[in-house]
Image: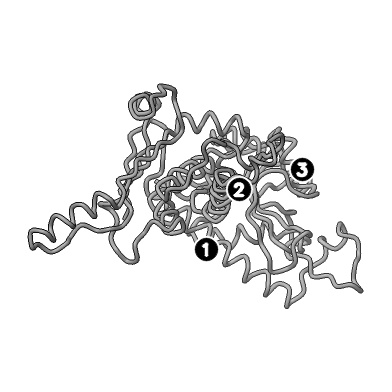
């Protein structure tokens, strides 16, 4: 295990990040086989004052930064082992790379707002960046090597530029692999149309997913809230939403119809004090994906009336979405999408979709259980 220390006021889920960082260390290639590395690596989340003091002391640059890496490289281990061998003792100090990554969530929180990305993803990106420094990868003097516009040809061909570009490309590839590890939804909303008429239609993949996920986590949709019931209803909308919660996670199925789902979602986020950019997951059908495919994405997506209404109500497209493929049309069957999605799923189609929904539900549930 990696030694993870949290010494900042920004709330960080230790269980979630412990596992994510261990996965990152493995992908970066810092682990040495099956060797225990808890005494070799540490990642520490600190406040802005601490990282500023460290930057001033070790970089001679007393400005707040997002990450510092301190390599306690193999040289120290080799020196200690050589001394032991010279005295006839057995070498016990591991030769694996060693070091500490110091990360400042306060600075990263500001940068996430500036760059319009989820805080958890930017925190992951910076942590991975620090780990890559321990692999002796660097990006100086080019801080943004992927933005090559304006750089002279001799610079673009230089070894330092090529190495920096390689580091940033590797970093983004790792973030793409790890981003799901650090996503912990607080509100999961399945989109669909209420009523028996639409229960088995392709457009109701979001509703179908929610039903399976609730069974996996053991929660139940017990009350359909409306504007004429419970206190929560005033925080939902005149249309209302079926609602459940399990621990710190809330679930909802807007009941006003697919294309007017937004107000219910926005009111729930407001009532539950949830930042949709960070902790909302919208689950919906997607004709851009084939039946049997699924994709977790963030930010503006393709045309979908229900999602567009959510974006209008939230005044942002920056939220997570789980897209469930429902397109089983072939070259001879290219009927209009708006008619196709309202048709019932065939028996074989439903089997394929149910399998994907069950796999996605288990994956989401594993993340939910890591929160706290």
Q: Residue at x 40, y 47 (%)?
A: 134
Toward the left, the furthest residue is: 87
Bin the neighbour count of mark 2 within 10 Å (Cα to Cα): few under 14, some 14-19, many 20 and up: many
The answer to which of 7 and 69 lies nearer the viewer is 69
* Numbered mark located on residue 362 in the image: 1
Name the residue tied to disc 2. 281
Task: Tell me: 199 left or right of 99.
Answer: right
Instruction: Answer with mark 3 or mark 1, whichever residue precedes in sequence.
Output: 3
Mark 3 and mark 1: Cα distance apart in space:
27 Å
Mark 2 and mark 1: Cα distance apart in space:
15 Å
When the figure is inspected, residue 239 is found, relative to residue 9, above or below; the finding is: below
Name the residue tied to disc 3. 308
Task: Tell me: 119 left or right of 229.
Answer: left
Q: Secondary structure beneath disc 2? A: strand
Instruction: Answer with mark 3 or mark 2, whichever residue precedes in sequence.
Output: 2
* Position of residue 99 measured from the top left corner of the image (x, y, whole percent): 32, 46
The answer to which of 27 and 229 lies nearer the viewer is 27
Toward the top, the furthest residue is: 62
* Position of residue 115 measured from the top left corner of the image (x, y, whole percent): 61, 33
């Amino acid at each position: 295990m990696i030694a993870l220390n949290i010494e900042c006021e920004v709330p960080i889920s230790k269980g979630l990040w412990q596992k994510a960082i261990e996965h990152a260390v493995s992908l970066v290639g810092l682990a040495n086989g099956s060797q225990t590395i808890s005494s070799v690596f540490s990642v520490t989340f600190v406040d802005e004052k601490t990282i500023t003091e460290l930057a001033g002391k070790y970089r001679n640059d007393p400005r707040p930064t997002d990450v510092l890496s301190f390599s306690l490289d193999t040289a120290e281990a080799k020196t200690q082992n050589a001394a032991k061998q010279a005295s006839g003792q057995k070498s016990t100090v591991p030769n694996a790379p060693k070091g500490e990554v110091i990360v400042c969530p306060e600075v990263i929180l500001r940068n996430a707002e500036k760059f319009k990305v989820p805080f958890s993803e930017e925190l992951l990106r910076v942590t991975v960046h620090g780990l890559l420094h321990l692999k002796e990868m660097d990006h100086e003097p080019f801080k943004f090597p992927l933005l090559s516009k304006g750089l002279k040809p001799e610079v673009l061909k230089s070894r330092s530029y090529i190495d920096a570009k390689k580091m940033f490309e590797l970093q983004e590839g790792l973030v793409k692999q790890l981003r799901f590890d650090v996503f912990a939804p607080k509100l999961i909303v399945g989109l669909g149309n209420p009523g028996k008429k639409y229960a088995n239609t392709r457009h109701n993949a979001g509703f179908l997913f929610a039903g399976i996920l609730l069974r996996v986590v053991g929660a139940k949709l017990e009350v359909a809230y409306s504007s004429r019931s419970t206190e929560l209803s005033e925080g939902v909308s005149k249309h209302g939403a079926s609602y459940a919660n399990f621990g710190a996670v809330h679930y909802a199925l807007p009941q006003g119809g697919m294309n007017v789902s937004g107000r219910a979602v926005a009111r729930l986020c407001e009532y539950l004090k949830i930042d949709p950019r960070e902790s909302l997951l919208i689950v919906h059908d997607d004709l851009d994906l084939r039946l049997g495919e699924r994709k977790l994405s963030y930010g503006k997506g393709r045309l979908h009336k229900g999602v567009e209404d959510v974006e209008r109500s939230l005044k942002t497209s920056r939220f997570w979405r789980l897209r469930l493929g429902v397109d089983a049309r072939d070259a001879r069957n290219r009927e209009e999408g708006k008619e196709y999605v309202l048709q019932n799923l065939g028996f074989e189609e439903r089997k394929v979709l149910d399998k994907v929904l069950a796999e996605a539900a288990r994956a989401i549930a594993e993340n939910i259980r890591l929160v706290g």
